[in-house]
Amino acid sequence: MPDPLAFANATTRFALPLLHAAQAQKETFVNEAFNLADALLHCAIEGETSLPQENSADGQVWLVGTGASGAWQGHDGEIAARRGSAWAFVEPRDGMRVFDVSAGREMLFFGSWRKASLPVEPVGGSSVDGEARAAINDLVSALQALGILPSA
């Protein structure tokens, strides 16, 4: 006899719960999926910290820092979303981007979280090229405005 059909219980990328025919209390699973999608869609984190932010408002999202403790222990590098009195964690996937509101910059996950750093303004040299420096400063300003580089 062939094997019975096996249905997944969650999506493959972010483990959003899936519904099954005749499933009881479907609203619980749908609401769980909506809450996770709400936390991840155009994700903006409040900041990065290793300590759980117990005074966080419902819906706030944080990046769990290295050496996390308390309710965040074992979730280093994950996204923590506050839901009521509990935390929901999402393991990042390659290509995931978040906007760090506290730093005013975008972060990219590719094996680990990557952050752009502000380049050092060129000074000195044997000849001063004002136009080149102005172009570099304009480029840095544009990248800051897009949230790719942090503000000074």
Image: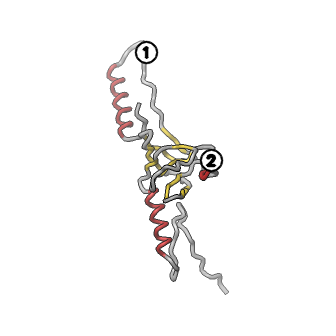
N-terminal of the pair, mark 2 or mark 1, is 2
Question: Dot 2 lies on which element?
Answer: loop
Residue 45 rendering spot, x and y as whole percentages: 46, 48
How many tags in the picture?
Answer: 2
Quadrant of the snapshot with the N terminus: bottom right
Residue 60 rendering spot, x and y as whole percentages: 46, 52
**What's the residue at 52%, 43% (across, down)?**
48
**What's the residue at 37%, 16% (across, down)?**
128
> Is the Cβ of the residue at disc 2 closer than 8 Å to that at disc 1?
no
**What's the residue at 45%, 56% (across, down)?**
58
Q: Farthest residue to the right: give it.
A: 1
Quadrant of the snapshot with the C terminus: top left
Mark 2: few/some/many CA within 10 Å (<14, 14-19, 20+): some
Amino acid carrying mark 1 in the image = Gly
- Name the front one of labels 2 and 1: 2
**What's the residue at 45%, 61% (across, down)?**
37
Residue 138 rendering spot, x and y as whole percentages: 33, 30
Which label belongs to residue 69? 2
Amino acid carrying mark 2 in the image = Ser
The colour scheme applied to this rendered structure is secondary structure
Is 129 placed above or below 80 here? above
Pick whichever, 128 or 137, lies toward us: 137
Is 105 placed above or below 44 here? above
Which label belongs to residue 104? none
Q: Which residue is mark 1?
A: 124
Mark 1: few/some/many CA within 10 Å (<14, 14-19, 20+): few
